[in-house]
Amino acid sequence: MQKKSGPLIVFLSSLLWASDAPFRKPLLTGGLGVGFVSFLEHIFNVLACLPGLFRHRLELKSVNWKQWLGLIYIGAGASALGAILFVKGAVVMNYNFTVAALLQKFQPIFAILLAVIFLKEKLNPKFWLLAIPALLGGYLVTFGLASPSVLWQSGSVNLIGAVLALLAAVLWAGGTVVGRSLLKGLNLQLVNGMRFAFGLVFLAGYVAVAESFQFGLMNPLFWRNTLVIAMLTGFFALLLYYYGLKSTKASIATLMELGYPLALTVVNWKFLGITLDAWQIAGALILLVSVTIFVLNNQHQDNN
């Protein structure tokens, strides 16, 4: 039953992620740093994970060094640094979380390229046939009909924002693969808890060096929004995600995560007034269709 419902559970978790932006934007426009907000989220997340960590604490004795590296990566890399890059990218693009989220759909393409580079896997002949339309769609989503030469000459902030969002996609692509690998040998509550714990350690250092601990700026609204983000789009969404991922192939999970940018587009339009023009909508459709075909084709190759 869980194996059949796994993809649906991953899809539902991606819908929860879409509720993030309306609660996060007031914190950032109110003067809080991107890293500090993530730091507060991870504090709440670690507190919520303590019962599960305590329950499965004895399993830590059997964690090998490769699993420790994996836990550190999904915590410090995918959870902490990935979130910072994603949010900073959206902020640079005038708080356009919609464009940043759509660019995340390059994850499966990055995952294949990383496998070719580091695991010496062979590149599917159809890779570029599907990757090129996706790249075109991603360009239209971000820049519309603007000429590439104009972007380089003007030093467009959109270019910087897009690069940051794409770097986050690279980290999250690795996080999906590593997370699924860890779940083969470790309890999902332990993986979830250690992800937030390592993320908290990384963020504490980041805020101390690159930002500041802005507890003096916190007011009841900020505390409420931070708690909602941490619990709804962090702890519960990620716990649900790992539960579904445990019985879902990474490629199918990536396909199910398409629910995130689609839902986020609606949420941001409804609550933040963020809209896409005709060329951006066309680009979004090209990107999502290309990535969907890409994932399904890759899944077909894995089954042969």
Image: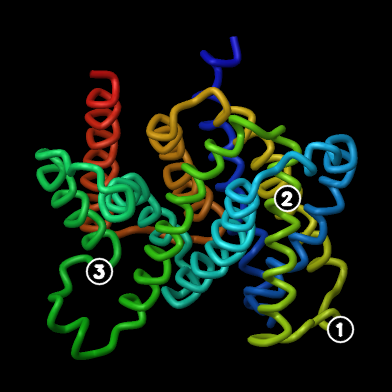
Disc with the residue nearer the chain's start (2 vs 1): 2
Looking at the picture, which amino acid does disc 3 mark? Phe
Q: Name the residue under label 2.
A: 194
Circle 2: residue type: Met
Against 43, residue 5 (above or below) is: above
Instruction: Return the mark for residue 143.
Output: 3
Where, quadrant-wise, is the C terminus in this rendering? top left
Q: Residue at x 16, y 84 (%)?
A: 150
Q: Residue at x 66, y 78 (%)?
A: 206
Q: In the rendered image, which quarter is residue 22 located in?
A: bottom right
- The residue lying furthest to the top in this view is 1
Question: How much space separates mark 1 and mark 3, taking CA atoms?
Answer: 38 Å
Distance from Cα at disc 3 to Cα at disc 2: 38 Å
Task: Tell me the amino acid under the disc marked 1.
Answer: Gly
Disc on the earlier residue, 1 or 3: 3
Quadrant (top left/top right/bottom left/bottom right) for the N terminus: top right
Secondary structure, mark 1, is helix
Q: Where is residue 282 in the image (x, y as percent from the top left)?
A: 22, 50
In the rendered image, residue 286, in percent from the top left (x then y), is placed at 21, 46
Q: Mark 1 points at which residue?
A: 216
Label 3: which secondary element: helix
Rendered position, 183 above or below 206: above
Give the class, few, some or many, for how many residues have Cα within 10 Å of label 1's Cα (few <14, many ≥20). Answer: few
